[in-house]
Image (cartoon, grey):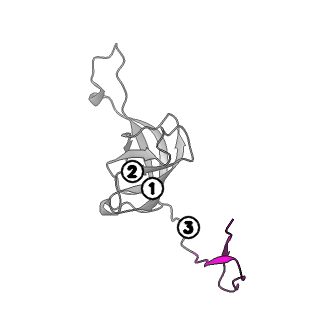
Amino acid sequence: MPRLLLLTQTERSIPGIRSWPFTPGENRLTVEESPPPIDASMICSEDDTVLLNDQRIAFIDRGRAHNVKPGQIYAVFQALEPSYRQTRSASELAPVNIGKLIVLHTEETTSTVLILSSTKEIHPGDKVR
């Protein structure tokens, strides 16, 4: 079985073992609690399942082109379904805040996020603001 060794700048490679130089990256996020609002939607979770709880990686449909940046924290909202007794349509009911997420990485039109907390299952299509 091949072995791989990550080396720091001061270490030397070991004969017979493949090595790859370690390059430190930016691994800290500057948290922004109240970023400008966005009108985004959840796309899917990392493993393409319903997002059941906290600490799951997911994706949203907004990115750098929409001024989304790593470290920004947003709320996740879900539309309420009217009960059989209610006469108002679902579009008239205010959405319910069901969770919180932080942006980890952005591409041009999408972002990778981490679900920080949730009170209900988060589904693709739920709104992010």
Kindly identify which residue carries mark 1.
112
Q: Which marked residue is nearer to the observer: mark 3 or mark 2?
A: 2
Can you see residue 34?
A: no
Q: Identify the residue under disc 3.
A: 28
First in residue order: circle 1 vs circle 3: 3
The residue drawn where x is 45% and y is 56% is 112
Identify the main secondary structure in magenta. loop
Residue 25 is marked as none
Q: Residue at x 30, y 62 (%)?
A: 65
Q: Is residue 24 above or below residue 114?
A: below
Q: Give the quadrant of residue 90.
A: top left
Q: Which residues are magenta?
A: 1-24
Secondary structure at numbered mark 2: strand
Type of the residue with mark 1: Thr
Q: Which residue position holds label 2? A: 60
**Label 3 is placed on what type of residue?**
Arg
For disc 1, the neighbor class at 10 Å (few under 14, some 14 to 19, many from 20) is many
Q: Is residue 117 visible?
A: yes
Q: Looking at the picture, how far across and down is residue 102, in whole percent?
A: 48, 54
Alpha-carbon span between mark 2 and mark 1: 7 Å
Residue 18 located left or right of residue 38: right
Residue depth check, mark 1 versus mark 3: number of the one nearer the observer: 1
